[in-house]
């Protein structure tokens, strides 16, 4: 069985396969490049002081980013306080309550918002929170990151809830269980791992945001004691050190970037572990 | 429960009286003017070709059809005298009195065997451990599953076999102590042995429950039911004792269907 042009077909086949393979490798390449570059430039500056000390003034050797690391975690926590409940409940609404026209608008808006440049978010929150409160603050930084998390979490929550077979909803309703209890105890519980995955991915995404924090959290060379004060964050610290003219600060910036990417990678790996567990369970 | 005054007549009084029931999905009439009395403590089989409205009829009895957008009903269904579509009765209340078992077994995957049995009680506010434990054993015994699972009540429900899962779903429905049990092709996804167990169970359960079962399987209807209703194109064509429907049907269409000439 040979088609008349099987030789050229085979050649085309091999060519396309090679091309896709090269493209697949190109996807991995940038990550490897970034990672090894950061390792070679930043690893030497990572030491105990980096995690425990405040930045030192120019000229003084040593110092660290302890306040920026704590600041990033503070901002993520504040953002979660806003983004997780609103995002998850919004996703529940989209998936579980049929309100066709409203759902269309919410979904459409969420998708548009997902595409809004992050610096725009910074400006909006600057106008809404920083100006009225007359100062940059951790609060404003948390709000801006939280707002960015909402559409991300909402859409992933909706998607994983849609994966829950309808038979479970019907079974619960047929037992005379009220709809909201059915949603919370059956549907959300069944999709819990997927929802947590979506939340973690959103966290990983906003943890590295810099632009929206420039107008809101602003950065801080010292510890922040109140949420109404400006707060340091890893991306901000990296930014200000990287554009400085000092070699010592450049090294610190590399180290900060390395810590940040390790943090984000850790979240992503956590997600992989969670989802692997989920799929093995589902295949039963 | 607002139905505390409900009078539960014993003996020949029907469990369900259906009068002039029509169901529409949008402009489409799926069920047309069905009038039927379903006997208490007996098994009534609903047969008919696909799309004849038999599942819709079943789902109208516990108001599950209302989950379909644009569903609308006309007529009346009374459960032991209570109008289940009356304004002051919530669907939730109706569904506690009318349990349902589905074609595809659907135990909750996040819960253990025991949790699955008691979920209807727990999510309706019953927390008393003693009641829950008692009801677990009682329901699993009624569903003929107790001996197979009594030593592993805490394992995930989805680790059971298909037939066991379906009996678990029956136990789950029985645990809330409904008056009527609806079964939508409960054995159609099971092997012959598991089917046999479900059929034995149905006959056992009719001592205490009113059972309405939709089935595609003529032998199953003939074996396990006392009454049979034949639906065709949304209409109730014929209804009567199962022996009569299968041996001396009054209607030509019924005869053609039960003898396998169409369907």
Image: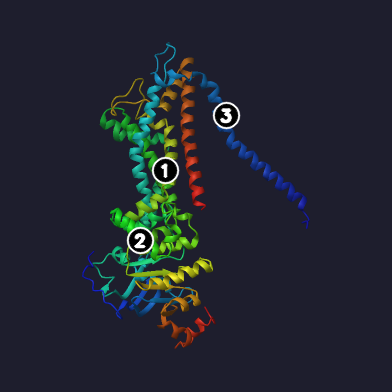
**Badges 3 and 1: C-beta atoms under 8 Å apart?**
no
Q: Position of residue B233 (x, y in %)?
A: 45, 78
Residue that carries the numbered disc 3 in the rendered image: A33
Q: Position of residue A54 (x, y in %)?
A: 38, 18
* Circle nearer the N terminus (3, 1): 3
Using a 10 Å C-alpha cutoff, classify the residue at mark 1 as few (fewer than 14 neighbours), some (14 to 19) or many (20 or more): some
How far apart marks 3 and 2 lie (CA) works out to: 53 Å
Determine whether B9 is above or below A83 in the image: below
Asked if residue B219 lies left or right of residue A112, the reply is: right
* Circle nearer the N terminus (3, 2): 3
Q: Is residue A47 visible?
A: yes
Front position in the image: A26 or B203? B203
**Element type at mark 1:** helix
How far apart marks 1 and 2 lie (CA) works out to: 25 Å
Q: Position of residue A60 (x, y in %)?
A: 42, 11
For residue A173, the mark is: 2
Q: Are marks 1 and 2 on the same chain?
A: yes
Determine whether B206 is above or below B253 in the image: above
Image quadrant in which you'd find residue A100: bottom left
Residue that carries the numbered disc 1 in the rendered image: A196
């Amino acid at each position: 069985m040979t088609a008349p042009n099987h030789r050229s077909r085979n050649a085309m086949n091999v060519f396309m396969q090679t091309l896709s393979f090269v493209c697949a490798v190109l996807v991995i390449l940038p990550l490897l490049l970034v990672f090894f570059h950061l390792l070679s430039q930043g690893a030497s500056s990572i030491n105990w002081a980096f995690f425990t000390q405040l930045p030192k003034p120019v000229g003084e050797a040593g110092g660290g980013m302890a306040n920026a690391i704590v600041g990033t975690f503070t901002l993520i926590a504040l953002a979660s306080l806003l983004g997780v409940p609103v995002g998850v409940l919004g996703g529940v609404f989209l998936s579980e309550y049929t309100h066709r026209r409203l759902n269309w608008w919410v979904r459409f808006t969420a998708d548009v918002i997902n595409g809004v440049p992050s610096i725009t978010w910074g400006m909006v929150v600057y106008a809404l929170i920083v100006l009225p409160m007359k100062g940059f603050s951790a609060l404003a930084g948390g709000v801006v990151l939280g707002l960015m998390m909402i559409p991300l979490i909402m859409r992933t929550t909706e998607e994983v809830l849609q994966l829950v077979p309808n038979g479970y909803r019907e079974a619960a309703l047929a037992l005379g269980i009220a709809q909201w209890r059915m949603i919370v105890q059956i549907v959300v519980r069944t999709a819990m791992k997927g929802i947590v995955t979506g939340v973690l991915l959103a966290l990983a995404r906003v943890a590295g945001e810099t632009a929206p924090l420039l107008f809101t959290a602003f950065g801080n060379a010292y510890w922040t004691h109140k949420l109404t004060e400006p707060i340091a964050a890893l991306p901000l610290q990296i930014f200000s050190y990287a554009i400085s003219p000092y070699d010592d600060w450049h090294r610190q910036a590399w180290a900060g970037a390395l810590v940040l990417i390790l943090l984000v990678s850790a979240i992503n790996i956590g997600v992989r572990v969670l989802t692997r567990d989920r799929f093995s369970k589902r295949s039963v | 429960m607002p139905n505390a005054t409900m009078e539960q007549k014993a003996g020949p009084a029907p469990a369900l009286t259906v009068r002039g029931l029509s169901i529409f999905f949008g402009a489409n009439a799926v069920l047309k003017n069905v009038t039927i009395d379903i006997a208490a403590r007996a098994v009534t089989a609903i047969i008919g070709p696909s799309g004849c409205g038999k599942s819709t009829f079943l789902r109208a009895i516990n108001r599950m059809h209302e989950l379909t957008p644009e569903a609308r009903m006309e007529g009346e269904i009374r459960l032991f005298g209570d109008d289940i579509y009356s304004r002051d009765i919530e669907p939730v209340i109706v569904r506690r009195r009318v349990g349902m078992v589905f074609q595809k077994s659907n135990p909750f995957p996040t819960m253990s065997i025991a949790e699955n049995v008691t979920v209807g009680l727990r999510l309706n506010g019953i927390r008393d451990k003693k009641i829950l434990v008692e009801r677990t054993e009682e329901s699993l015994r009624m569903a003929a599953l107790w001996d197979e699972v009594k030593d592993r009540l805490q394992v995930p429900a989805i680790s059971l076999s298909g037939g066991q899962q379906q009996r678990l779903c029956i136990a789950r429905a029985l645990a809330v102590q409904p008056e009527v049990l609806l079964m939508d092709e409960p054995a159609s996804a099971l092997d012959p042995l598991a089917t046999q167990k479900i059929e034995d169970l149905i006959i056992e359960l009719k001592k205490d429950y009113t059972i309405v079962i939709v089935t595609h399987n003529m032998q199953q209807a003939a074996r396990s039911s006392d009454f049979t209703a034949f639906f065709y194109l949304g209409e109730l064509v014929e209804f009567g004792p199962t022996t009569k429907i299968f041996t001396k049907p009054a209607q030509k269409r019924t005869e053609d269907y039960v003898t396998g000439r169409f369907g």
